[in-house]
Image (tube, rainbow, N blue to C red):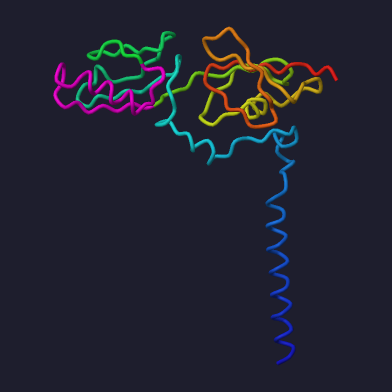
Protein backbone atom coordinates (compact mmCIF):
# COMPACT_ATOMS: atom_id res chain seq x y z
CA UNK A 1 0.00 0.00 0.00
CA UNK A 2 2.83 2.41 0.90
CA UNK A 3 4.62 1.61 -2.35
CA UNK A 4 1.52 2.49 -4.40
CA UNK A 5 1.14 5.83 -2.63
CA UNK A 6 4.81 6.59 -3.25
CA UNK A 7 4.38 5.94 -6.97
CA UNK A 8 1.46 8.34 -7.14
CA UNK A 9 3.44 11.02 -5.35
CA UNK A 10 6.37 10.61 -7.72
CA UNK A 11 4.06 10.80 -10.74
CA UNK A 12 2.46 13.97 -9.37
CA UNK A 13 5.88 15.59 -8.86
CA UNK A 14 7.02 14.61 -12.35
CA UNK A 15 3.84 16.03 -13.92
CA UNK A 16 4.23 19.29 -12.03
CA UNK A 17 7.89 19.59 -13.14
CA UNK A 18 6.91 18.89 -16.76
CA UNK A 19 4.19 21.55 -16.68
CA UNK A 20 6.59 24.10 -15.17
CA UNK A 21 9.18 23.40 -17.86
CA UNK A 22 6.58 23.78 -20.62
CA UNK A 23 5.44 27.17 -19.31
CA UNK A 24 9.03 28.36 -18.90
CA UNK A 25 9.96 27.37 -22.45
CA UNK A 26 6.88 29.12 -23.85
CA UNK A 27 8.22 32.41 -22.56
CA UNK A 28 11.60 32.06 -24.23
CA UNK A 29 12.52 33.55 -27.62
CA UNK A 30 12.38 31.21 -30.58
CA UNK A 31 15.86 31.58 -31.98
CA UNK A 32 15.08 29.09 -34.73
CA UNK A 33 13.03 31.92 -36.26
CA UNK A 34 15.28 34.19 -38.39
CA UNK A 35 13.18 37.18 -37.36
CA UNK A 36 13.87 36.48 -33.67
CA UNK A 37 17.57 36.06 -34.35
CA UNK A 38 17.73 39.59 -35.78
CA UNK A 39 15.75 41.10 -32.92
CA UNK A 40 12.61 41.53 -35.05
CA UNK A 41 9.32 40.17 -33.81
CA UNK A 42 6.72 39.37 -36.45
CA UNK A 43 3.14 40.37 -35.75
CA UNK A 44 1.14 37.40 -34.54
CA UNK A 45 -1.95 36.20 -36.39
CA UNK A 46 -4.11 37.67 -33.64
CA UNK A 47 -2.52 41.11 -33.90
CA UNK A 48 -2.91 41.12 -37.68
CA UNK A 49 -6.57 40.19 -37.52
CA UNK A 50 -7.18 42.85 -34.86
CA UNK A 51 -7.30 45.44 -37.68
CA UNK A 52 -9.39 43.59 -40.22
CA UNK A 53 -10.41 44.49 -43.77
CA UNK A 54 -13.69 45.98 -42.54
CA UNK A 55 -11.95 48.50 -40.25
CA UNK A 56 -8.99 49.22 -42.53
CA UNK A 57 -8.99 52.75 -44.00
CA UNK A 58 -8.76 52.65 -47.80
CA UNK A 59 -5.92 54.40 -49.62
CA UNK A 60 -4.81 55.10 -53.19
CA UNK A 61 -3.70 52.01 -55.16
CA UNK A 62 -5.83 49.68 -53.03
CA UNK A 63 -8.20 47.45 -54.95
CA UNK A 64 -11.76 46.78 -53.84
CA UNK A 65 -14.08 43.95 -54.83
CA UNK A 66 -17.57 45.31 -55.41
CA UNK A 67 -20.70 43.23 -55.68
CA UNK A 68 -24.06 44.79 -56.50
CA UNK A 69 -26.60 42.01 -56.35
CA UNK A 70 -28.51 41.69 -59.59
CA UNK A 71 -26.08 43.99 -61.46
CA UNK A 72 -23.31 41.77 -62.78
CA UNK A 73 -22.06 44.44 -65.20
CA UNK A 74 -21.22 46.81 -62.34
CA UNK A 75 -19.77 44.16 -60.04
CA UNK A 76 -16.03 43.55 -60.19
CA UNK A 77 -12.62 44.67 -58.91
CA UNK A 78 -11.80 48.39 -58.97
CA UNK A 79 -8.61 50.29 -58.19
CA UNK A 80 -8.62 53.47 -56.11
CA UNK A 81 -6.74 56.03 -58.21
CA UNK A 82 -4.06 58.51 -57.18
CA UNK A 83 -6.71 61.07 -56.33
CA UNK A 84 -8.33 58.68 -53.87
CA UNK A 85 -11.43 58.04 -55.98
CA UNK A 86 -12.94 55.01 -57.66
CA UNK A 87 -15.11 55.08 -60.77
CA UNK A 88 -18.02 52.64 -60.69
CA UNK A 89 -20.62 52.04 -63.42
CA UNK A 90 -24.07 53.30 -62.39
CA UNK A 91 -22.64 55.09 -59.33
CA UNK A 92 -20.03 57.26 -61.07
CA UNK A 93 -16.87 58.61 -59.45
CA UNK A 94 -16.81 58.25 -55.66
CA UNK A 95 -14.11 59.39 -53.24
CA UNK A 96 -12.99 56.23 -51.42
CA UNK A 97 -9.67 57.08 -49.76
CA UNK A 98 -10.14 57.66 -46.04
CA UNK A 99 -13.21 55.42 -45.83
CA UNK A 100 -13.47 51.88 -44.55
CA UNK A 101 -14.95 49.20 -46.80
CA UNK A 102 -18.18 49.39 -44.78
CA UNK A 103 -18.35 53.19 -45.16
CA UNK A 104 -17.73 52.97 -48.90
CA UNK A 105 -20.42 50.31 -49.09
CA UNK A 106 -22.93 52.68 -47.50
CA UNK A 107 -21.84 55.55 -49.75
CA UNK A 108 -22.36 53.50 -52.91
CA UNK A 109 -25.71 52.23 -51.63
CA UNK A 110 -26.87 55.78 -50.96
CA UNK A 111 -25.71 56.94 -54.41
CA UNK A 112 -27.62 54.14 -56.15
CA UNK A 113 -30.74 54.05 -54.05
CA UNK A 114 -33.72 55.80 -55.60
CA UNK A 115 -31.78 57.02 -58.63
CA UNK A 116 -30.62 53.98 -60.56
CA UNK A 117 -31.80 51.10 -58.38
CA UNK A 118 -34.45 50.51 -55.76
CA UNK A 119 -33.19 49.15 -52.44
CA UNK A 120 -29.78 48.04 -53.82
CA UNK A 121 -27.77 45.40 -51.99
CA UNK A 122 -24.07 46.33 -52.11
CA UNK A 123 -21.03 44.53 -50.73
CA UNK A 124 -17.50 45.98 -50.70
CA UNK A 125 -14.38 44.07 -49.68
CA UNK A 126 -10.68 44.86 -49.87
CA UNK A 127 -9.26 42.81 -52.75
CA UNK A 128 -5.59 43.81 -52.50
CA UNK A 129 -3.67 46.42 -50.55
CA UNK A 130 -1.05 48.70 -52.05
CA UNK A 131 2.47 47.29 -51.43
CA UNK A 132 5.14 48.64 -49.09
CA UNK A 133 8.74 49.29 -50.11
CA UNK A 134 11.92 48.87 -48.08
CA UNK A 135 15.47 49.82 -49.04
CA UNK A 136 18.82 50.61 -47.53
CA UNK A 137 20.61 48.37 -45.05
CA UNK A 138 18.45 45.26 -45.35
CA UNK A 139 19.50 42.01 -46.97
CA UNK A 140 16.75 41.83 -49.60
CA UNK A 141 15.39 45.32 -50.37
CA UNK A 142 12.33 45.56 -52.57
CA UNK A 143 8.55 45.61 -52.72
CA UNK A 144 6.42 43.49 -50.41
CA UNK A 145 2.66 42.93 -50.00
CA UNK A 146 0.94 44.74 -47.16
CA UNK A 147 -1.30 43.12 -44.57
CA UNK A 148 -3.16 44.94 -41.78
CA UNK A 149 -1.04 45.17 -38.65
CA UNK A 150 2.29 45.23 -40.49
CA UNK A 151 5.07 47.07 -38.63
CA UNK A 152 8.52 48.29 -39.63
CA UNK A 153 9.99 45.31 -37.78
CA UNK A 154 7.85 42.97 -39.87
CA UNK A 155 8.98 44.72 -43.06
CA UNK A 156 12.62 44.30 -42.08
CA UNK A 157 11.99 40.60 -41.46
CA UNK A 158 10.34 40.25 -44.88
CA UNK A 159 13.44 41.85 -46.38
CA UNK A 160 15.70 39.23 -44.78
CA UNK A 161 16.75 41.23 -41.73
CA UNK A 162 19.31 43.96 -41.18
CA UNK A 163 22.77 44.01 -42.72
CA UNK A 164 25.73 44.27 -40.34
CA UNK A 165 26.01 47.98 -41.22
CA UNK A 166 22.42 48.86 -40.35
CA UNK A 167 21.31 51.43 -37.84
CA UNK A 168 18.80 49.37 -35.86
CA UNK A 169 17.58 52.27 -33.75
CA UNK A 170 15.87 54.46 -36.36
CA UNK A 171 14.05 53.99 -39.66
CA UNK A 172 12.92 56.64 -42.16
CA UNK A 173 9.42 56.36 -43.57
CA UNK A 174 8.02 58.22 -46.57
CA UNK A 175 4.23 57.81 -46.76
CA UNK A 176 2.51 57.25 -50.10
CA UNK A 177 2.02 60.44 -52.12
CA UNK A 178 4.50 62.32 -49.93
CA UNK A 179 8.00 63.54 -50.72
CA UNK A 180 9.03 63.85 -47.07
CA UNK A 181 10.68 61.22 -44.92
CA UNK A 182 9.89 60.95 -41.22
CA UNK A 183 12.25 59.44 -38.66
CA UNK A 184 10.73 56.62 -36.62
CA UNK A 185 12.29 55.08 -33.50
CA UNK A 186 12.58 51.30 -33.65
CA UNK A 187 12.41 50.94 -29.88
CA UNK A 188 8.67 50.28 -30.28
CA UNK A 189 6.59 48.58 -32.97
CA UNK A 190 5.80 51.22 -35.59
CA UNK A 191 2.87 50.43 -37.92
CA UNK A 192 3.19 51.06 -41.64
CA UNK A 193 0.57 51.73 -44.29
CA UNK A 194 0.20 50.61 -47.92
CA UNK A 195 2.45 52.62 -50.20
CA UNK A 196 4.93 53.50 -47.45
CA UNK A 197 8.60 53.53 -48.40
CA UNK A 198 10.95 52.51 -45.58
CA UNK A 199 14.66 53.31 -45.54
CA UNK A 200 17.11 51.72 -43.13
CA UNK A 201 20.24 53.83 -42.91
CA UNK A 202 23.81 52.87 -42.18
CA UNK A 203 25.08 53.04 -38.63
CA UNK A 204 28.05 55.37 -38.03
CA UNK A 205 29.09 53.77 -34.76
Task: Give the vertical position of 1 relative to 86 (above or below).
Answer: below
| Identity of the residue drawn at 85% across and 20% down | 205
| Identity of the residue drawn at 33% across and 26% down | 103
Question: Where residue 5 appears, x then y in whole percent?
Answer: 70, 86
| Identity of the residue drawn at 18% across and 22% down | 113
Q: Left of 132 or right of it: where is 64?
A: left
Q: Give 104 or 117, whichever is nearer the viewer.
A: 104
Question: Where residue 195 appears, x then y in whole percent?
Answer: 53, 16
Residue at the farthest bottom position: 1
Task: Give the vertical position of 50 relative to 5 (above or below).
Answer: above
Please state, as top left, top right, bottom left or bottom right, where the N terminus lies in the image: bottom right
Question: Which region of the structure is painted magenta?
Answer: 96-125
Task: Give the vertical position of 9 relative to 172 (above or below).
Answer: below
Q: Left of 68 or right of it: where is 5?
A: right
Q: Quadrant of residue 143?
A: top right
Would you say residue 113 sits in the magenta stretch? yes
Would you say residue 69 sits in the magenta stretch? no
Task: Give the vertical position of 63 relative to 53 (above or below).
Answer: above
Q: Quadrant of residue 190?
A: top right
Q: Quadrant of residue 67?
A: top left
Amino acid sequence: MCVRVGERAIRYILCAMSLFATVALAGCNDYSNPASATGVQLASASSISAVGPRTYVLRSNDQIRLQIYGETNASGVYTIDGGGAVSIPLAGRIHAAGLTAAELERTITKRLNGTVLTDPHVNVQVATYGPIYIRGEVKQPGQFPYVPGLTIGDAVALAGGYTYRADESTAYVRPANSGREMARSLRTDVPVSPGDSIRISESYF
